[in-house]
Amino acid sequence: MQPFVYNALPSRVIFGTGTLDQVPQEIKRLGCSKALILTTPQQAKEGKELKKLVGDLAVGIYTNATMHTPTNITDDAVGLAQKLGVDCLVALGGGSTIGLGKAIALRTDLPQIVIPTSYAGSEATPIIGQTQDGQKTTQKTMKVLPEVIIYDISLTLTLPTQMTVTSGLNAIAHAVEALYAQEANPIIDLLAQEGIKSLAKALPVVIRGKEQDVLQARSDALYGAWACGTCLGAVGMSLHHKLCHTLGGTFNLPHAETHTIILPHAIAYNAPYAKSAIAKVASSLGAENAAQAVYDLAKGLGVPYSLKELGMKEEDLEKAADIAVKSPYPNPAPLERERLLKLLRDAWAGNRPE
Ligand code: NAD
């Protein structure tokens, strides 16, 4: 065994079906009695049902969570929280809603119960990204790590088909980069392989499987998302996440779709320099070539596989390559502008990695 350092993050995780019923007792367990429920406008209905379930323990609901956590929305929600005198937050939704909860917690120190309904993994991380004046900045602070995560499989049954796949690939990306992270360690290694395996097995069944198998596959997918999200929270990410951050922030490309498209190319870029980690990815996917297996998985499930399809302009690829080499960070392969430009061109055209 190689020497390693492992920092476990404190958080309580409840996983199952029908676990939403446990929200009232979790609010009380935190010593709270005045919760503010958070959702996006698209999940307001689920938020209102949750408010009914929580009864007197919820004093309000805010249904305007928005992708990339704009600070004006946070200002608005903090204003409501102060007006209502809330003592905890209950965020129900994907990464955007959880991001709003974290942004409020950053400013107020309110404890958070989060109920993830996508596979993005934000619930398990002390990371917060916020957007002000079109600039997205990210910081890491334990102030934003949610105290309680409640995974309820039944809430993921409504996740639309395309988002199920792209969000699942977004989760797999956390695990892939955890396997070659500088802080890699045996616990995270095991979780990463388990997460990749579970999601890769579950996604085709959720999308194309027999109806009677979907619930079990949704359960496996959410379990995989928990494992992958834990990897994201525990170790630093590299080329793949930095590229996706640049493409999302500078060119306004959608989060999960961008991850899905870039991942096979980022794997191919790093493969010669992270042989053992990429071999673990391949074996978790039951394949010889990890980059091609990820590409085939996504393309086979009918989601966009080129940046072109997301509306990125070919002439912006040079600018993206410039940004990608501007501020260096740890990565198995050296960050070389010409190789990065080729990666971006392949991702733009939707080429299958070699
Ligand atoms: P999202 O939260 O923006 O969700 C997209 C849409 O799908 C929303 O309208 C949402 O309400 C809806 N939705 C979510 N779950 C649903 C369900 N089960 N049924 C029906 N509709 C559902 O998308 P996302 O990909 O989950 O999150 C992306 C955001 O999260 C980005 O801003 C990203 O930067 C952030 N993120 C942050 C971290 C972190 O650690 N800080 C990690 C991952 C993602």
Image (tube, helix red, strand yellow):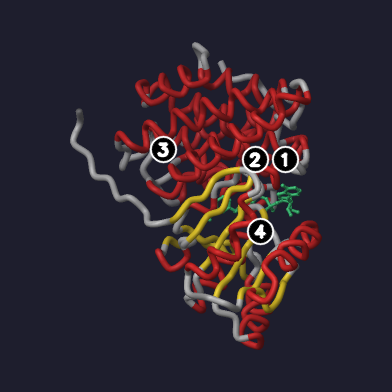
129 to 169, vertically: above or below = below
Viewport quadrant of the C terminus = top right
Q: Earlier in the sequence, mark 4 or mark 3?
A: 4
Q: Nearer the viewer, residue 208 or 48?
A: 48
Choose between 293 and 56: the one closer to the eye: 56
Q: Is residue 305 left or right of residue 341?
A: right
Marks 2 and 1 close (CB-CB < 8 Å): yes
Residue 116, position as x, y percentages in the image: 61, 51
Closer to the chain start, of discs 4 and 2, is 4
Label 2, on which residue? 167
Confirm if mark 1 falls within 8 A of ligand 1: yes
Indicate which disc, 3 or 1, sits on the residue closer to the N terminus.
Answer: 1
Say above or below: 197 vs 170. above
Q: CA distance from mark 1 to mark 4?
A: 17 Å
Q: Foreground mark, 1 or 4?
A: 4
Q: Provide the residue designation for mark 1.
A: 163
Quarter of image, res 65: bottom right
Residue beneath disc 4: 92
- Relative horizontal placement of residue 173, taking residue 64 as reference (left or right): left
Relative height, residue 341 to residue 30 (above, below)? above
Q: Amino acid at mark 1?
A: Met
Q: Crowding at label 2, few (<14), some or many (≥20) Cα neighbours within 10 Å?
A: many
Asked whether mark 2 lies closer than 8 Å to ligand 1, one says yes
**First in sequence: mark 3 or mark 2?**
2
Mark 3 vs mark 2, CA separation in Å: 17 Å
**Disc 3: which residue:** 178
